[in-house]
Structures are given as structure tokens and as C-alpha cells.
Image (tube, rainbow, N blue to C red):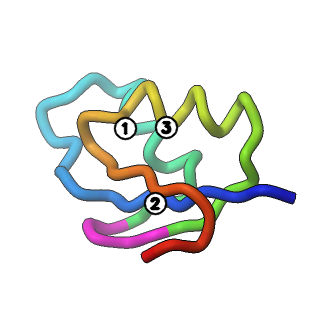
Amino acid sequence: MATFRVTYRKSAIGYRQDQKDTIRKLGLRRLHQTVELEDTPVHRGMAAKVSHLVDVREGSEQ
């Protein structure tokens, strides 16, 4: 199955609680942490919602 990587780049301090919750639900706990997620519409939508806080990379590229 296709995957993509999400890296937590900017703190969520000062942003709404729903965006903080989305960061947590993506599996991100600390800054500069990277998680690999299945490429589903749900995960893509979550990453798009907090795109100003994270970097998204396709596949297993670093």
C-alpha cells in the first residue's frame, strides 16, 4: 500500500485546539518527529488541515 511521511515542523502553541488534536491523531508527539502513514483520504485530509505545521513527503523519501 502507498504511504507518505509527515514531519512535525512548527509548534501548535497559539493555534486552535482542533488543530492540536489533529497533530496528535496523526501520531506526532514532538517537534521534528516523522511518522509514515497509509495514503488514505482520511490521512491526507488530516495532513492538509495542519499543512502550515507539518511537512508532507511522498513515499519513503527522506
Q: Residues within 10 Å of mark 1 (few under 14, many from 20)?
A: some
- Pointer 1: what residue? 20
> Looking at the picture, how far across and down is residue 46, in whole percent?
55, 32
- Pointer 2: what residue? 28
Rounded to the nearest angstrom, the CA distance separating label 2 from label 1 is: 10 Å
Relative to 46, 11 lies left or right: left
Q: What quarter of the picture does the N terminus occupy?
A: bottom right
Instruction: Say which mark, if any, is on residue 33.
Output: none
Q: Quadrant of residue 36?
A: bottom right
The residue sitting at 49% across, 37% down in the picture is 47
Q: Secondary structure at mark 1?
A: helix
The relative height of residue 21 versus residue 33 in the rendered view (above or below) is: above
- Pointer 3: what residue? 47
> Looking at the picture, how far across and down is residue 55, in whole percent?
34, 51
Of the image marks 3 and 2, the number of the one nearer the N terminus: 2
**Type of the residue with mark 1:** Lys
**Type of the residue with mark 3:** Ala
The residue sitting at 23% across, 57% down in the picture is 9
The relative height of residue 47 versus residue 34 in the rendered view (above or below) is: above
Please tell me whether mark 1 or mark 3 is closer to you in this view: 3
> Looking at the picture, how far across and down is residue 33, in whole percent?
38, 72
Q: Secondary structure at mark 3?
A: helix
Relative to 61, 60 lies left or right: right
Between residue 11 and residue 53, name the one nearer to us. 53
Relative to 54, 41 lies left or right: right
Q: Which stretch did the figure color magenta?
A: 30-34
Please tell me whether mark 3 or mark 2 is closer to you in this view: 3
Q: Quadrant of residue 58?
A: bottom right
Tell me whether the residue at label 2 lies in contact with that at label 1, contact meaning CB atoms closer than 8 angstroms.
Answer: no
